[in-house]
Amino acid sequence: MKKLSGALILIAALGLSLLFRSIEYGPGLVWGSYFLAYLKDMLRILPFAFILIGLFEVWVKRETVERHLGTRSSPAAFLWAILLGGVTVGPMLVALPVAQALRAKGARLPVVLTYLGAAAVCRIPMMLFESSYLGLRFTILRFGISLPLILLSSLALGRYLEGKEKP
Amino acid sequence: MVLIALTLLLLLLSFLRDRDKTRIALKRAAVKFLNIAFIIVLLIVLIPLVFVFLPEDQLGPLFQAIPLSAGLFLASLLGSVTMMPGFIAFPLGGILSESGVPLTIIAGFTTTLMMVGIATFPIEKRYFGTRTALLRNLVSFFLALIVSLIIGLSSGEWL
């Protein structure tokens, strides 16, 4: 049901954007250009990201994840989380399923939260892009301040929430 | 591009190693994707409406006219509600910066844009539960404010 309406909405939106283009309806063009840009971005990234997640779930053993990112892991787990966040491609929409997959395989919540934060603001390709528009200084500053704050807040928040999770 | 190449490569390796596992992996990927596909369609159709009503050329003057704290708060709010790929957000930020909008405000906008998501909240809620999703977004919001203020401070925009 949902899938059908979703597909219908999508087709309708595509149709509308074409219509707006042809009759040159101002606001419609604005909407259309953003919509198409988003659509292209999603299609370019989402299917492949999900395939990677599927492969991860099937091939990576739970024990491996637990050992490196779980409750018995060392602080190095956070380094891995940051690195993984740094190479994540795509918006939060991609990072969220990845984070959930990690969690399902036994990663600790503080580590997963660190990954989410890092994937949000420390993505390397994105930072390169950012520095080209807003300056290297801006990017470095932002990165340098965000990262420790993300670590600290994820640790605190993760610990707090973990405590709440045990029923 | 790297993503696509890497994915196809790993997919191929997986297929050669174990066909059944690969099929399962693809099935799970498809299921996960379809689970959130509807929300994503809604997002990409509805969020652009924000930009229809947003007067981009008036943003510059607006943010310079109001006090910095108000501008920061406004920009952060806007960033929290919107969702934008980097390749749209940063050029926009660059233009605003050149037309005089303080870096504090731009930092607030871009950071909340990436870290906080009212738009992605339903998905996050589904994956991690309401409490975690809510708190993470809230904490990220304040984190963004702090980062922006420090950037502004070091850029001499206040104090």
Image: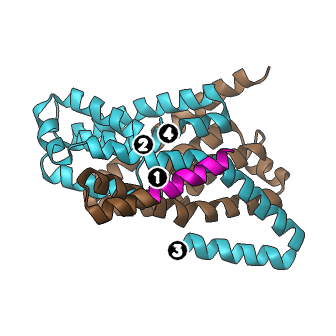
Chain colours: A brown, B cyan
At label 3, which amino acid type do we have?
Answer: Met
Q: Chain of mark 3?
A: B
Horizontally, residue A121 falls left or right of residue A69, namely left
> Image check: A94 left or right of B109?
right
- Badge 2 element: helix
Judging depth in this view, the residue of A54 and A135 nearest the camera is A54
Residue tagged by mark 3? Answer: B1
Marks 1/4: CA–CA distance: 10 Å
* Among the two numbered marks 2 and 1 on one chain, the one whose residue lies closer to the N terminus: 1
Q: Which amino acid type is marked by label 1?
A: Cys
Q: Which SS does the magenta portion mostly show?
A: helix
Give me the residue at 48% from left, 39% from top. Answer: B119
Residue tagged by mark 2? A146
Residue type for callout 4: Ile
Do the residues under discs 3 and 1 have CB atoms within 8 angstroms? no
Work out whether disc 2 and disc 1 sit on a shared chain: yes
CB atoms of marks 1 and 4 within 8 Å: yes
Picture coordinates of residue B138, whole percent (x, y): 48, 28
